[in-house]
């Protein structure tokens, strides 16, 4: 009986380490596309002076005006937030699968990040107009994405047979992860647009136009049309399609490696 808590803690630590590693690798690889996606989402139409003509134009403009490090602006907050968050995400998901009897289907780094946070707190506080601005939209974005992402991946993975060839098995998992991230991105992007509008610069300085998640969605739809709720979809898919695949693959392979290492140690 004494071995059970130790076994649980060991398994939990492996899930946390694997999840954190997956989040860190995915952020470092895919952050430039997140920057591009956000730039598209905060545009308010063709009359916006910062409007980008196309995805290529956005990449080119950022590179010309801000250099290579421009694509890594704001990467520190995601690393600090997403690495532990994804560690907890994977651990929680694994535990909920056990607890609920998961029903599967049949066979630029920006060093000024802390300064920016201090400035936000100073001017807006910690509430809905400060550091927690856009919280509802963020929760909606993550909630919808994770529901689709994990649900699709782990159900479809059980449908498609495991391949004995390790290379083909890698491609099978990557393909499922790619489709999972893509579908989840398409479904949750209106929340992402609302988050970017609420947290981004307002159209009129000193006047808050975008306040709440669903009201922001309604405003964008009314003023700019239905497709405006899908601004930045292509870079988002380019980021979270392969990014979602990378994250799941890193998690699974790191977790398997940790388990094998423990089993090998116990064997000897």
Image: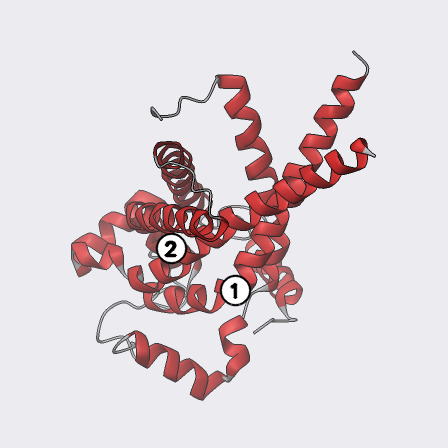
Q: Residue at x 42, y 80 (%)?
A: 62
Q: Which mark is residue 86?
A: none
Q: Give 110 or 90, whichever is nearer the viewer.
A: 90
Give the farthest residue toward the bottom: 64
Q: Give 3 or 194, whichever is nearer the viewer.
A: 3
User: Is disc 1 placed on a helix, strand or loop?
Assistant: helix
Q: Which residue is mark 1?
A: 29
Dot 2 alpha-carbon crowd within 10 angstroms: few under 14, some 14 to 19, many 20 or more: many
Q: Which mark is residue 241?
A: 2
96 left or right, relative to 113: left
Residue 74, by quadrant, is bottom right
Residue 152: x percent and y percent? Answer: 36, 37
Residue 44: x percent and y percent? Answer: 27, 67
Residue 116: x percent and y percent? Answer: 60, 65
Q: Give 253 or 45, whichever is nearer the viewer.
A: 253
* Chain-order first, disc 2 or disc 1: 1
Quadrant occupied by the N terminus: top right
77 w.r.t. 35: above or below: above
Q: Mark 2 and mark 1: span between their CA atoms?
A: 12 Å
Q: Residue at x 60, y 56 (%)?
A: 24
Q: Give 251 or 211, whichever is nearer the viewer.
A: 251
Q: In the rendered image, is residue 212 in sight?
A: no
Dot 1 alpha-carbon crowd within 10 angstroms: few under 14, some 14 to 19, many 20 or more: few
33 w.r.t. 180: above or below: below
221 w.r.t. 151: above or below: below
In contact (CB < 8 Å): disc 2 and disc 1? no
Q: Residue at x 52, y 64 (%)?
A: 29
Quadrant occupied by the C terminus: top right
Q: In the rendered image, is residue 266 in sight?
A: yes
Q: Residue at x 33, y 57 (%)?
A: 209
User: Is disc 2 placed on a helix, strand or loop?
Assistant: helix
Give the farthest residue toward the top: 1
């Amino acid at each position: 009986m004494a071995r059970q808590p130790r076994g649980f803690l060991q398994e939990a630590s492996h899930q946390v380490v694997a999840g954190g590693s997956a989040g860190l690798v995915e952020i470092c690889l895919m952050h430039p596309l997140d920057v591009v996606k956000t730039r598209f989402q905060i545009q308010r139409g063709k009359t916006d002076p910062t409007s980008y003509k196309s995805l290529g134009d956005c990449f080119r403009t950022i590179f010309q005006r801000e250099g290579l490090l421009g694509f890594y602006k704001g990467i520190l907050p995601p690393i600090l937030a997403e690495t532990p968050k994804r560690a907890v995400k994977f651990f929680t998901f694994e535990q909920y699968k056990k607890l609920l009897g998961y029903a599967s289907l049949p066979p630029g780094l920006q060093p000024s990040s802390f300064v920016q946070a201090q400035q936000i707190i100073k001017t807006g506080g910690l509430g809905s107009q400060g550091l927690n601005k856009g919280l509802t939209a963020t929760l909606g974005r993550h909630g919808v994405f994770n529901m689709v992402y994990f649900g699709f991946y782990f159900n479809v993975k059980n449908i498609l047979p495991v391949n004995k060839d390790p290379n083909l098995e890698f491609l099978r998992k990557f393909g499922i992860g790619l489709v999972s991230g893509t579908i989840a991105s398409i479904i949750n992007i209106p929340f992402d647009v609302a988050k970017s509008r609420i947290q981004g610069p307002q159209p009129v300085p000193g006047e808050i136009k975008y306040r709440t998640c669903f009201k922001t969605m309604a405003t964008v739809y009314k003023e700019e049309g239905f497709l405006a709720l899908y601004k930045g979809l292509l870079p988002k898919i380019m980021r979270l399609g392969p990014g979602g695949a990378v994250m799941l693959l890193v998690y699974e392979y790191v977790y398997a490696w940790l388990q094998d290492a423990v089993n090998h140690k116990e064997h000897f």
